[in-house]
Image (cartoon, rainbow, N blue to C red):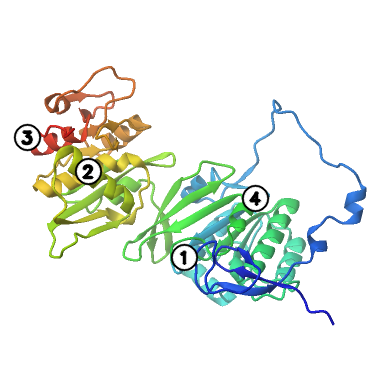
Amino acid sequence: MAKAQSVFVCQSCGAVHARWQGRCEACGAWNTIVEEARESPQALSPSARARGKGPGLAFQALDGVAQAPPRLATGIDEFDRVCGGGLVEASAILVGGDPGIGKSTLLLQAVAGAATRGIKSVYVSGEEAIAQIQDRARRMGIEKAPVQLAAETRLETILEALKHEKPQLAIIDSIQTVWTETLTAAPGTVAQVRACAHELVRYAKKAGTAIILVGHVTKDGQIAGPRVVEHLVDAVLQFEGERGHHFRILRGLKNRFGPTDEIGVFEMGDAGLREVTNPSQLFLDNRGHARPGSVVFAGIEGTRPVLVEIQALASPTAFGAPRRAVVGWDTTRLAMILAVLETRCGLAFGGRDVYLNVAGGLKISEPAADLAVAAALVSALFDQALPEDCVVFGEIALSGDVRPVSRADARLKEAEKLGFTQAFLPRAASSNTTASTASQARRLVAGQSGVKHRVIATAADLVATITGQEYPETP
């Protein structure tokens, strides 16, 4: 009897190897390669009947006008915002997050809200019993919602039930627990996750059902499983949050039917998740009086302006090598800002430990936070507090120049709405005025939004504005 052919697949990235080895050459992970049976080529190729029919694909002109896909509203505005205005029929969404962050709670609220609006909805759990889900629903006060529950992990059984019920919305929690009997690999392996996700997505496209798949997250914060699963689905949502904070952030990483990098903010309570319609006020709620090293950054998350506090501390180092600790921002970006301040402004951070924190647990990735981080570092170094009613934003180049950023008007309007009266910001790209000296940069100019603009042209201008001293830029 011929021996079945097998391959060795990395469970972290999905790379295929000819033999077992301790370290995956593709992603560098250790002890993640598992032997799996090779998939039959006949299963991947079209059948003879399909090949004999000839071309069955209808093309359309590029200038045609196609109708926008209909949306299914869940009643949770923050969730619908991240999805692009609601769930799209015949779409597949992958939701990832740390264990215990609240993924099941959020999706149970979403499916209950959709069911109360007449959308036929089912919830299939592979990790919890039906009694546990019912207890959670009673605690959140949504037990009266007409949601059909099931606890199953076998793919064939799930598909048969979906074909029989014909729901408009289906939740699969989670994709790592689903397995198909056509593969001999264990549940949660790359082969099982890829095959089950492919079949569920194919069913969603054929039946017109919106399917939400829940995915586990690895230790480095990435959604577990092969990257091909993220390519199969239409949207990838990440549920973030720190256990020490009471709010959670739903962030869109990929969306074929809406804007990417959109966020929805929720507050965790005893009765589930509550929507936060004004996240800027939440992030600044515990901010006291102006302190050295504290700066309010006016950022943009997706289509929404968000104000958040950035905190910095520069203390003398007690060891030979100074320490750099960052929470909520890019460590490499911090090293670049420190190098600009040392080289262009002559500030000495080499003998100090630098700590940077984005208050509230929000993670910032846009370059517009450069000027706010630099202001917090300078404020902490000279023990000089910025005005309490001031916001800061701008991108810093390696030359020390401060570059303009997008959607400055939206940032200033959000700041004005929360009571801020002045802003440190770069010179507008369309402006012909120049700020050649620090005294010109420190001049306040009232803008259209009602917030007074303090133009910062270079990093040296920022240092001079905060300290009140002249710090010419170092060539």
Inter-mark Cα distance, 1 to 2: 44 Å
Foreground residue among 191 and 143: 191
Is residue 296 in view? no
Say whether marks 1 and 4 touch (CB < 8 Å): no
As drawn, 50 above or below 319: above
Residue ID for mark 1: 140
The mark that comes first in sequence, 1 or 4, is 4
The mark that comes first in sequence, 3 or 2, is 2
Residue at the (14%, 49%) spot, across then down: 380
Foreground residue among 294 and 6: 6
Residue type (three-letter) at the residue carrying disc 4:
Ser
Inter-mark Cα distance, 3 to 4: 58 Å
How many C-alpha atoms fall within 10 Å of the one at disc 4: few (<14), some, or many (≥20)? many
Residue 399 pos. (x, y %): 26, 34
| Residue 108 lies in quadrant | bottom right
Query: Label 3's element?
Result: loop
Inter-mark Cα distance, 1 to 3: 57 Å
